[in-house]
Image (tube, grey):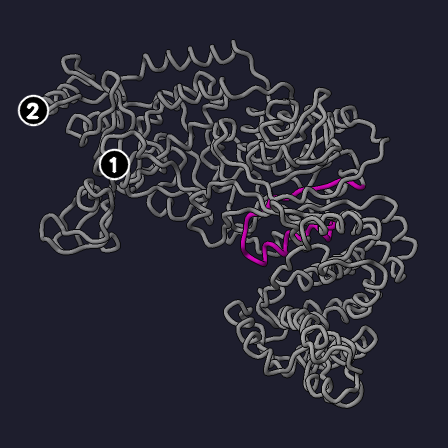
Amino acid sequence: MAQLIEDAAPDDASHYYRTPLAVDVAEGKNDPIYNLHSYHTKVPPRAIMRYILHYTKPGDLVLDSFCGTGMTGVASQLCGDAAVVKELGLKVDAQGNVFQHGSTDPCSEVGARVPVLLDLSPAATFITNAYNTPQTEAHWQTVESHVSVIDGDLGWLYQTLHAANAVTAQKAATFLRDKGEVSDDFAYGRVNYIVWSDIYSCPQCAESFDFWTVAVDQDEGKVRDEFPCPRCQKHLGKGDLEPVKTWTAAPDGGEPVARKAQRPVLVNYTYGKKRFTKEADVFDEELSSHVSRFPLSDWVPTDPISPGDKSVEAIRAGYKTVDSFYTARSLQVLARLRKLGLHSWPPFSALTPRATRMHRIAASRIGGEKKGVGGATVGVINGTLYIPSLSVEMNVLDQAKDRVKNFSRSLHAKRHGFISTQSGTHLTSIPNSSIDYIFIDPPFGANLIYSDLNQLWEGWLAVHTANEHEAIESAHQEKTINSYRRLMSSAFAEAFRVLKPGRWITIEFSNTRASVWNAIQVALQEAGFVVANVSALDKKQGSFNAVTNPTSVKQDLVISAYKPNGGLEERFERRSSDVQSVWDFVSTHLKNLPVLRTRGDQIITVPERDPRIIFDRMIAWFVSHGVPIPLSSGDFQAELRERFPSRDGMIFLPQQIDTYDRAALQKGGASQIELFVSDEKSAIDWLGDLLRARPSSRQEITNDFTQKIGAGWRKHEAKPELIDLLEQNFLMYDGNGPVPTQVHSYLSSNWKDLRNLDKDDPRLVERARNRWFVPDPNKQQDVEARREKALLREFDLYKAFKGKKMKEIRLEVMRVGFKAAWAAKDYRTIIDVSAKVPDEVWQEDERLMMLHSMAETRLEADR
């Protein structure tokens, strides 16, 4: 691949410059290409197109090292279709130049990009290849003919009696049992799907019954929470029931397996051109039983399901092998499809999850007026291998026909991309600085365990994920959040190596756990990337997982980060800990931030231009390079405002400020983002913002402060007293001497009777007395130095602590102590103190996690 990429990569002689795409992208999932093939998580290709068009030009190499189903490849190819680009709401002129909304300067050009698509999972790269490999019309005609032949042989598997009474159903069942074949003497419909129900027994009288009959109210379209036993009338809930087990023979001749007993209870079928729904009768039961005894002459996967975080429940229920997730009828069809070589075409892999017992029924869609409609099946629960008590067996032959039709109609790949099954932590086949842009949607902690979930696909492919380098949290794989961060650090380090200097990486993020969010950002910054923007990506439809799982979010976040150009790195190597390196970094960083963000007619704040965030990015830059930080927070903030202009709480380069001022003149200034208070540091920041705008007495602050440190306060963080925060971080005017400038300015601006008074006027002094205010820069440095000494004394107590875990801590003590230990190269103290507090204390704080991570790296290097 290395030589191919070198040959494909265009020379980059022209000057490249982009700021991040700082818009909130919204693209729905109702895209035929997106819906062709299911996967655990996907980003709509049209959403990815916006990023590719912004950051690249035609022919550029676009890398996705966690490619999943290959949507980045699809997006790269769709960039060559002017009609699709226009559908995004972007203007395209006759020359193929692309313009953002309202802009007179082109941002890109219509033209395909070259995708480089990698994934650790063979199932993922198989699907990716299907989406990104050109296919001829003749290919699809051949596939259709194969499916038609199989339908001719096995179509009888999906027959059901139409309008039959109990007598005719019994006659048909008896004939099938005696003759071993279906009689032609009856009218048959073609099955669309069959609902199967688990069988349970009553704990009081041991009566057996199926869950559907006793629990589902078809008229109301709901599953009852309580229901009577049909024999003893005892009131039961599902948790009271005892599952009935049945022994099932293994297809490979192995030991029989005890599994939950099921029976067919409802059949949805087509007769003529109409759909009907009926209760399963004795013929339907006999046909299902007959098929289960029918020999399997073709190969099916019998691989054991590996115990994992997402498969334990299914294994407990007796579904211990790949084949056990399918009914006997589905296995007959899938085995025949595979025998003809159709397992190597994408509609087959699209079939395999839909054909499982994991397919669910929505009781609400079959009740009342909707009874008999075909929309009662709702697919597979995302994120787990789980077989529900009411499962749906689809007509796999009809599903195969639909898949073939949809694929042949919707896939129009014009060129091949580079596709490889390999870990994103080892991109050895890609040369240094050869990639123009990276878009990835990586795993997020324990959200989804891909190697567990892909076992069914990979069973049919007969090749499995080598999960040693799978970047996840998993108890079964013994991978902690730290393991996850290390693997993501390796992946980002490789991404950094292969990306050209000055170019961008976009990471789609979907997890609300602070520890995972911090692990991603720390891994990015350890690799050398600098975060420049975080925006929203609204997929418009929350998946089932996003709606019910507290660790998922309905609106994904998109992180934009850049690889600094070579000039900054070279200058940093020469000066490293010199203070000038701070301002060199800040200038470069400000250049790479969006100058303006708007939503409708309103300017919105760019959070990355907040002085506090800029300071955090500077710290991360120095720490990732193993260099001491040459400025304190107070010194940095004071000099930052002297060196750079600010507007609405944001810092700009001098050459950027005119653009912002012109927009602000038309639309008004940006509204301030309300600060979320969760710990001592954010409480201090909130107080600083309040007192800077409105110097106030303690009494005036108390109510607002009490509300701010309410429900959102971190679990293990000690709650400070307001008076302590004020005394340690701010100054109070006690009435002695002239009124401070900040207090004088506030009072004279808000009270007419205090205007034009001298700073020592008694009336002004009286109103100013006991008001707290933010110290001017020189005094603030003194206040900060005193406070830091006090915090370090408290950190000594943390170091001396002898118990198991401290239950309550001050994050500010940890931050100051870790910073001092890092400067002294005392990495052992950082690790030891981390072990004395609950893991979430340092895992949920980006700066602490970064210093902990780098301390681990330094200690390992010293061994």
Q: Nearer the viewer, mark 2 or mark 1?
A: 1
Q: On the image, numbered disc 2 is attached to which residue?
A: 167
**Of 532 and 806, the residue lying toward us:** 532
Q: Are marks 2 and 1 in contact (CB under 8 Å)?
A: no
Q: Is residue 518 magenta?
A: yes
Q: Residue at x 55, y 72 (%)?
A: 709
- Which quadrant would the C terminus be assigned to in this image? bottom right
Q: Which residues are magenta?
A: 502-530
On the image, the x and y values in percent for residue 590 come to: 78, 51
Among all residues in the image, which is located at the extreme right?
Answer: 574
Q: Would residue 830 be seen by someone viewing this image from the given angle?
A: yes
State whether residue 310 is above or below residue 134. below
**Of 731 and 115, the residue lying toward us:** 731
Mark 1 closeness class: few <14, some 14–19, many ≥20 residues within 10 Å? many
On the image, the x and y values in percent for residue 620 come to: 75, 58
Q: On the image, numbered disc 1 is attached to which residue?
A: 366
Q: Residue at x 46, y 49 (%)?
A: 309
Q: Is residue 370 magenta?
A: no
**Tag 2's secondary structure?**
helix
Amino acid carrying label 2: it is Val
Q: Would residue 487 be seen by someone viewing this image from the given angle?
A: no
Among all residues in the image, which is located at the extreme left?
Answer: 167
Amino acid carrying label 1: it is Ile
Q: Can you tell which quarter of the image residue 776 is in?
A: bottom right
- Which quadrant would the N terminus be assigned to in this image? top right
State whether residue 801 is above or below residue 543. below
On the image, the x and y values in percent for residue 558 come to: 62, 45
Which badge, 2 or 1, comes first in the chain's sequence?
A: 2
Q: Residue at x 67, y 76 (%)?
A: 751
